[in-house]
Amino acid sequence: MTTAASPPEVLRAPLVVEFPFTRSLGPVQSAFLTGLRERVVLGVRTTDGTVMVPPVEYDPVTAEEIRELVEVGATGTVTTWAWNGEPRPHQPLGTPFAWVLVRLDGADTAILHALDAPGPEAVRTGMRVRIRWAGERTGAITDIACFEPHEFEPHKGDAPAQAAPHDGQFADAVTGIVAEARLDYTYSPGRAQTAYINALAERRTVGERCPSCHKVYVPPRGACPTCGVATTDQVEVGPAGTVTTYCIVNIKARNLDIEVPYVYAHIALDGADLALHGRIGGIPYDQVRMGLRVEPVWTEGGRHPDHYRPTGEPDADYDAYKELI
């Protein structure tokens, strides 16, 4: 009696993609963010009289440049909302809260932020709210810590504020910000690439052959992009291959301990019908060329080739790799 082997576990790993960048601010955005630091909310009045908060620099209807700043209230009305029962890291509040669109008093458009409420039953469209300012303010949207409920009696003096002209002048104005774009998620390479990665850990390179056109894809994709059929027939290729094309890298990447300049190349491994990419070492960067025959170099304990180096063989004929460029 034989027992079928269990399929290998598909790999999964956390992955973070982030791209923080520095941007300068024009006069409108500078005044808006500096105003938040000073607990003042500014908007702009467009050519048709609409007060927009947050402010924009160009009229969305006429595309004209707009610079008429106005101050609006720190209280407002919820126009719509959605409950967030499981806050993510770096969101405004660490406990469950509501995302709300709030039309501040004096404004004609709504601003998106968090509302601190005990539960969804405490939130409704039309409810009155006010800004809860952050204890330390630096000139960023996070200077508004969140909104909180704020009911008022409709007697004289409690009427919503009206937009008032403002010159936008503050001491030590904010002129630039660092915008942080970040995405955290769990990545799975799937069945085909899991097998490819596991084989690399054994210093083997494994691709998959299409049962229709018979092309061998490395790394495998699980399906043939030309024929649209599943690829399950594993094929070991290489280890040597041919440089099909390359580029010289002159800018040092952060957290990458490689001295520039260096060469990054597309390499067609023997037996493969798709070129993979890898760094070329063991040769001066200005001697790398198309057709150069190379082989992988593994480091102790490495799960993938560190780089590729020349094998010493004669260069491959162009006709042997031209279809893989």
Image: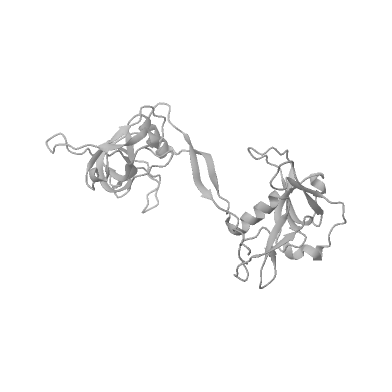
Provide residue 311's location: percent of width, then percent of height.
84, 51
Instruction: Decide which of 23, 27 is in the foreground and name it.
Output: 23
Which residue is painted at 23% across and 47% down in the image?
A: 124
How many numbered circles does the render carry?
0
Provide residue 179's location: percent of width, then percent of height.
48, 39
- Scheme of colours in the image: one colour
Provide residue 308's location: percent of width, then percent of height.
77, 49
Instruction: Decide which of 296, 104 is in the foreground and name it.
Output: 296
Which residue is painted at 74% across and 46% down in the image?
A: 307
300 to the left or right of 147: right
Above or below 172: residue 298: below
Which residue is painted at 39% across and 32% down in the image?
A: 34
Tell which residue pokes out farthest to the front in this image. Answer: 1
Tell which residue pokes out farthest to the bottom in this image. Answer: 212
Above or below 37: residue 160: below
Instruction: Decide which of 167, 122 is in the foreground and name it.
Output: 122
Provide residue 289's location: percent of width, then percent of height.
80, 53
Q: Quadrant of residue 43?
A: top left
Q: Quadrant of residue 256?
A: top right
Instruction: Decide which of 302, 323 is in the foreground and name it.
Output: 302
Which residue is painted at 46% across and 33% down in the image?
A: 175
Residue 325 appears in the figure:
no
Residue 233 appears in the figure:
yes
